[in-house]
Image (cartoon, helix red, strand yellow):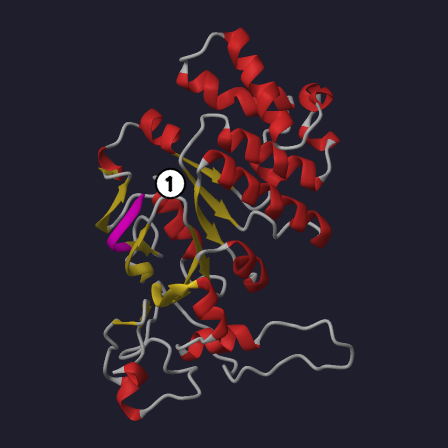
Amino acid sequence: MIEVRNVHRRFSSGGMFETGQVVRAVDGVSFSLASGGVLGIVGESGCGKSTLGRMILGLLPVSEGEILVDGQDLRLMDRKARARLIQPIFQDPFSSLNPRQRIHQIVGLPLAAQGTLPRARQRDEVMAMLARVGLPVAMADRFPAELSGGQRQRVAIARALILRPRIVVCDEPTSALDVSVQAQILNLLADLRRDFGLTYVFISHNLAVVEHVATEVAVMYLGRFVEHAPAGRLFSDPRHPYTRALLASVLTPEPGRPIPDVGLGDTYPDPSAIPSGCRFHPRCPLAMARCQTETPVAVMQDGRRTECLLDT
C-alpha cells in the first residue's frame, strides 16, 4: 500500500539573504507497508517522524527519493485523488478544527471540496459518519469549543474518513487527551481499521500506545530508521541500543521507583550537525572506536532490519 524509497527531506536554516545550515530532517528512509497494516514510528522529538508523515500525506515535497502510494508516485497524483486515498489525523483536535465552523460543516468539507455529491447526500453522509465515530447527531450543529477534547478528536476522525480513504496518517492522535479518553480513541481507531480496511501510519513517542496498535514498529533517530521489526518481536527483544534505551525509559506506576537512567547522557541529537560514523555513537553506552568513523549498513535478519555495527 505504501512504499518509501530512500526518501530525504532537507531544510535550510538560513534566511533569504544568508546561507544557513542544512537540516537533514529525513535522511534516507526506506520501508514498505502492506494493506491493512499499522506502522508505528517512534523516536524522540525532532527525529523526523512528523516530517516523514507530512511527506507521505503530500504536504511536504520530497528532496530526494520517491513515495509510492497504492502503486502510484505521490508527486504525480492529482490533489483530489490523493485526498481520496490518504487522510491525516493530527495531534491537537482543537487547533486542527476551524473554530468558526459547525461540526457538520467541518466533517463535510472534504465532500464539498471533491464536488461529487449533491448537498442533500453530503448531509446524510456526514450524519452517518458522526454516528459511526460515536457522536450523537445533536452535536452536528455545535462548534468545536462546545465539545470535549475526546469529542473533538472524534470529529477529526470523522472528517478524515468521510471520503473513505484507504490510508490514514495519525500524528500523535492521542497525546493531547486524558488517559481514559486515549483508550476510547485507540479502540475506535482499531474498530474503524477493521471495518473500513484501513492502513495506518501511526506516529507517536508513547511506546505503550504504539505497542497496543501497531503491527510493525520503526524506531527513528536523527532522520533514519535504526530498527524496523514486527511489533511483538521489537518489544520483546530489542536489538538496537537506542531501541533498548527507549524501552528502558518508560515510566512504571510502581510507587517509590525513581526516574529510570537509560544511560543516554545529556547530549541531545542535533539534525543540523549529524555526527560522523554511527549517528548514535555520542550517546551510545555500547559505542566502540569504529562507531565514530564507520557508518553502519542496514542488516536484515529474522524479519527485522537494524543499523548497528554490533550486528555486523
* Residue 143 screen position, x and y as percent: 69, 25
- Secondary element type, mark 1: helix
Q: Residue at label 1? A: 57
Identify the residue shown where x is 69% and y is 41%: 149
Answer with left or right where residue 227 lies relative to residue 126. left
Is residue 312 something that shows in the picture? yes
Extreme residue in the right direction: 255
- The amino acid sitting under disc 1 is Leu
Residue 11 location, quadrant: bottom left
Screen quadrant of the N terminus: top left
Answer with left or right where residue 122 lies relative to residue 94. left
Whether residue 192 is in magenta: the answer is no
* Residue 110 screen position, x and y as percent: 47, 23
* Residue 135 screen position, x and y as percent: 68, 29
Is residue 101 something that shows in the picture? no
Extreme residue in the bottom direction: 289
Segment colored magenta? 1-8
Residue 3 vertical position relative to residue 192 in the rendered view, above or below: below
Answer with left or right where residue 185 lies relative to residue 37. right
Residue 63 vertical position relative to residue 270 in the rendered view, above or below: above
Residue 142 vertical position relative to residue 299 in the rendered view, above or below: above
Out of 289 and 198, give the one closest to the viewer: 198
Dominant secondary structure, magenta: strand
Identify the residue shown where x is 42% and y is 80%: 241
Residue 113 vertical position relative to residue 49 in the rendered view, above or below: above
* Residue 297 screen position, x and y as percent: 23, 74
Screen quadrant of the C terminus: bottom left
Identify the residue shown where x is 41% and y is 13%: 115
How many neighbours does mark 1 have within 10 angstroms: few (below 14), some (14-19), or many (20 or more)? many
